[in-house]
């Protein structure tokens, strides 16, 4: 979700950097027919998030995604649908190492691919199912690889490693403090890792998993180990998909834009909502004209805010919401992440009861269903503005509902009317 970075890693002078993402796994441990890298998280394939994490970094020149031959069309459709750039698809081999080797060959063997890419000085190898990698750790392993020839992220062991005897009983255990778990990303001088793959045996290619070991075994290159962060974990089991979705939802819930107009009641509720919500998340508050043709609002969309709260006193007049939806569609923001659009209606009538016709209710629900297909989640919230003494309490209730809708992003509640 961050803006693309164009600056190169600080420190040593560095030539071209490329990334190879092995994505040929079958996902047997996850269960189900869909390989984990293609499983949907918030409506988008997991691998798309990992590709996005790489392509938002301007100093990575090429991204090679290695998939099994039967999934090349699926990967191509993902690239086209989500507008990924600098990405090339390569057919993988029957094992992880053979797939990585195929990914490296596009830079060195013209006969392997119809166009030879510029050979990078450093190549990053990163699992396609580790979507939360950040630029900081990528920069650290790249610069360490530049200096040492190879580098990889590590994390402390969570569990003690034990060895069992032939009879199934405990043989011995390792002192956990002395060992680390090897993670991704890893980075190598291209010539070093490519030479290692050229020299390694069929046994290495078929049964090995650790790239750093190949660099040590065949090129005598001792990898620099870089302490990684907790977000480098790999999606392996179904529960990991739920965890990934939770992280993405949390990232999307950090900012909200509250849109009001100049009317006194609307402005007052907008101010109170702003003051209440800003205790939990970042709030951008703007007042726009009825036509919603506002440059400030366009800037909000350009900044990729995924949560909008629109306050008005025109009960269930959806014209304003339709305009916002049209602007969102033009911005392409909903292409990557679901956008929450909450229409807050003020009931300032003197009547004790609130009425809404069945035809009107059906029309709003139909509209919400239609835009949900475009990844825009429209919710409706009613605030009764009759008792000024209780208004602050009512707004607090509204803010709690708004936060719940933003954090949960439940598509089943779209079009429903909630009352604060």
Image: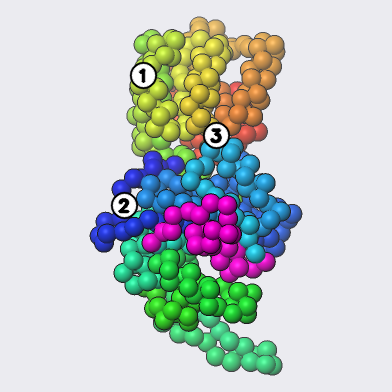
Point out the image quarter for the N terminus.
top left
Residue at the image position 40 percent from the left and 67 percent from the top: 189
Residue on which the image places disc 1 = 295
- Classify residue 78 by image quadrant: top right
Question: x, y percentage for residue 241?
Answer: 60, 53
- From mark 2 to mark 1, how far is it between C-alphas? 32 Å
Question: x, y percentage for residue 320?
Answer: 51, 14
Is label 2 in a helix, a strand or a loop?
loop
Is label 1 in a helix, a strand or a loop?
helix
Badge 3, how many Cα within 10 Å: few under 14, some, many 20+? some
Residue at the image position 41 percent from the left and 59 percent from the top: 120
Residue at the image position 63 percent from the left and 60 percent from the top: 92
Residue on which the image places disc 3 = 335
Residue on which the image places disc 2 = 8
Q: Is residue 253 left or right of residue 236?
A: left
| Of pointers 1 and 3, the one earlier in the residue sequence | 1
Question: x, y percentage for residue 325?
Answer: 53, 21
Task: Judge whether residue 188 can be spotted in this image.
Answer: no
Classify 173 as above or below 239: below
Badge 2, how many Cα within 10 Å: few under 14, some, many 20+? some
Mark 2 vs mark 1: in front? 2
Magenta extent: 94-121
- Classify residue 121 by image quadrant: bottom left
| Of pointers 2 and 1, the one earlier in the residue sequence | 2
Task: Judge whether residue 362 can be spotted in this image.
Answer: yes
Residue at the image position 66 percent from the left and 57 percent from the top: 68
């Amino acid at each position: 979700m961050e803006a693309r970075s164009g600056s190169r890693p600080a420190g040593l002078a560095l030539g071209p950097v490329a990334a190879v993402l092995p994505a040929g796994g079958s996902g047997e441990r996850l269960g189900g027919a869909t390989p984990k890298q293609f499983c949907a998280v918030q409506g988008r394939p997991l691998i798309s998030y990992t590709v996005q994490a790489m392509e938002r970094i301007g100093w990575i020149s090429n991204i090679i995604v290695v998939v099994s031959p039967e999934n090349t069309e699926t990967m191509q459709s993902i690239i086209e649908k989500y507008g990924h750039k600098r990405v090339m698809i390569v057919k993988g081999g029957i094992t992880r190492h053979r797939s990585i080797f195929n990914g490296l060959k596009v830079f060195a063997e013209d006969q392997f691919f119809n166009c030879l890419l510029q050979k990078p000085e450093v190549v990053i190898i990163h699992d396609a199912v580790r979507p939360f990698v950040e630029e900081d750790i990528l920069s650290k392993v790249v610069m360490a690889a530049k200096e040492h020839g190879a580098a990889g992220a590590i994390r402390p062991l969570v569990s003690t490693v034990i060895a069992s005897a032939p009879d199934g009983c405990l043989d011995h255990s390792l002192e956990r403090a002395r060992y680390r778990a090897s993670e991704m990303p890893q980075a190598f001088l291209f010539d070093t890792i490519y030479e290692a793959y050229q020299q390694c045996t069929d046994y290495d290619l078929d049964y090995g998993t650790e790239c750093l070991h190949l660099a040590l075994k065949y090129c005598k290159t001792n990898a620099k180990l870089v302490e990684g962060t907790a977000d480098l974990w790999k999606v392996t089991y179904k529960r990991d998909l739920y965890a990934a979705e939770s992280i993405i939802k949390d990232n999307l819930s950090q900012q909200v834009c509250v849109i009001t107009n100049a009317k006194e009641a609307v402005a007052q509720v907008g101010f109170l909502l702003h003051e209440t919500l800003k205790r939990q998340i970042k709030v951008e508050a703007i007042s726009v004209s009825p036509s919603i043709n506002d440059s400030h609002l366009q800037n909000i969309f350009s900044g990729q805010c995924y949560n909008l709260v629109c306050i008005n006193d025109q009960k269930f007049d959806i014209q304003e919401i339709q305009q916002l939806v049209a602007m969102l569609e033009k911005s392409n923001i909903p292409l990557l992440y679901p956008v929450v659009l909450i229409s807050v209606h003020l009931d300032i009538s003197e009547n004790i009861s609130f009425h809404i016709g069945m035809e009107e209710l059906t029309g709003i629900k139909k509209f919400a269903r239609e835009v949900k297909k475009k990844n825009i989640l429209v919710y409706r919230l009613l605030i009764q503005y009759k008792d000024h003494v209780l208004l602050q309490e009512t707004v607090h209730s509204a803010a709690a509902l708004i936060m719940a809708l933003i954090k949960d992003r439940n598509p089943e509640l779209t079009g429903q009317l909630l009352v604060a």
